[in-house]
Image (cartoon, rainbow, N blue to C red):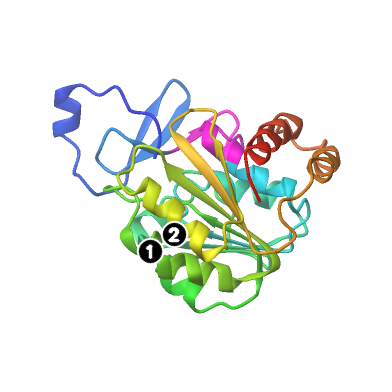
Amino acid sequence: MEKLLGWTVEEQASIEPGKPHLEERDGILALHFGTSSIQSEMSLDDPDELVIPYTTDVMAFLLFNPAPENIAMIGLGGGSLAKYCYRHLPQADITVVEIDPEVIALRNEFAIPADDARFRVSQGDGADFVASEAGYFDVLIADGYDADGLPAPLSSQQFYDDCFSALTEDGILAANLWFGHPRYDQCLDRLRTSFDDRVIVITADDNLNRIAFALKSDQFPPSAATIRHHANLLASHTLNFQAKANKLIRALSEITV
């Protein structure tokens, strides 16, 4: 969830709550679920650009592993993260799981790539998906929100336990958490329980979201030198990974192991 749309009362009344809805303004296509909270945004001039600030912070998972081979995402939205990974990580096999078929039906509007040998969008329950996997994914991205916020099945202790099990030995979970959500602290506590306190939290550039990186490896915390080295490896990306590295290193400095 993200910043709010500036709707009039009349505009709000004309939209069916809970249903995916598109709004185009000032060259930006926005996805929402009948509320004023934005789920995803896309620049019509540059469909692959990461427009919403928190998405750029989610991509900081590459500072732990700059070349993941298997990525799974829970929640499609407008496909911002899926498109970025598809375009910039050609070595990666990417699976996106989205529970709402009406969201998947909008993939062409958001210029989401068609399924191919290394990219697929599947309709299904994200909690069931991670429960069915074991030790396969290098990266899991948990970004599944609906009209009511973060669904309980995607923030339960069992869900985070299953995420841990679905990762490889050096795997990373990147979880987007809305700071204003009433279960925010509970979600963090559950993450720390599942990952034995190997969790790093950064504040997204929008100051509304927190991105929690949970690491399966017991080689924790990673060194600042390693993170900076990985940022250098990512210099060809359109994102400023040096700035993300600085943010991550500051967060690491606050961790007591």
Contact check, label 2 and label 1, Cβ < 8 Å: yes
Nearer to me, 90 or 169: 169
Instruction: Please say if 96 is above or below 14.
Output: below
Q: Position of residue 157 (x, y in %)?
A: 41, 66
Q: Which residue is drawn at 61% across and 47% down?
A: 83
- Among the two numbered marks 2 and 1 on one chain, the one whose residue lies closer to the N terminus: 1
Residue 243 position by quadrant = top right
Q: Residue at x 47, y 51 (%)?
A: 143
The residue carrying mark 1 is 156
Front position among marks 2 and 1: 2
Q: How crowded is mark 2: few (under 14 residues within 10 Å), some or many (20 or more)?
A: some
Q: Which residue is drawn at 16% across and 34% down?
A: 14
Nearer to me, 187 or 128: 187
Magenta stretch, residue numbers: 40-57
Q: At label 2, which amino acid type do we have?
A: Arg
Q: At label 1, which amino acid type do we have?
A: Ser
Q: Position of residue 9 (x, y in %)?
A: 15, 24
Residue 190: assigned label = 2
Q: Does dot 1 land on a helix, a strand or a loop?
A: loop
Q: Please identify the quadrant where the N terminus is shown.
A: top left
- Measure the alpha-carbon separation of dots 2 and 1: 7 Å
